[in-house]
Amino acid sequence: MADGYLTTHVLDTARGVPAEGVKIALYKVSGNSHRKIAETVTNADGRTESPILPKDQFKTGTYELVFFAGAYLKATGQSGAEPLFLDEIPLRFGMADPDAHYHVPLLLSAYGYSTYRGS
């Protein structure tokens, strides 16, 4: 059994705070096929309550996290005019090591975002 797992969090870089209430969906990607395998919402710390892909479900492969940032930006008064510049933010990445902890955070503002492989 693999010991790998996947975590994420969202930080609101414009306000300098964790982004609470951001819906996140995780998809397993195979070619042009996407299969949703998890959905969660960030807590007051901008994190999920548990790994979005826990050890008992972890498999190597290509995945996509979709952050529903538009609803969060609207709720915090940062969205700007319609249509939103940022609404749903997809991040596609690969996980090759079956025993690694992968951490894929989102640093968010109304007009930009970044990510990295964290620890």
Image (cartoon, rainbow, N blue to C red):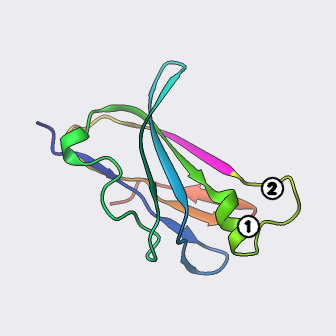
Left or right of 14: which side holds 77? right
Question: Residue flagged by tag 2: what amino acid is it?
Answer: Leu
Callout 2: 10 Å neighbours few (<14), some, many (20+)? some
Q: Nearer the viewer, residue 47 or 74?
A: 74
Q: Earlier in the sequence, mark 1 or mark 2?
A: 1
Callout 1: 10 Å neighbours few (<14), some, many (20+)? some
Return the mark for residue 84: 2
Find out whether the residues at labels 1 and 2 contact each other: C-beta distance under 8 Å: yes
Residue 34 placed where, x, y %?
50, 27
Residue 50 placed where, x, y %?
30, 60
Quadrant where the N terminus sits is: top left
Q: Residue at x 32, y 46 (%)?
A: 53
In the structure shown, which secondary structural element does the residue marked by tag 2 occupy? loop
Could one spot residue 65 in this view of the protein? yes
Q: Which residues are magenta?
A: 88-92
Return the mark for residue 74: 1
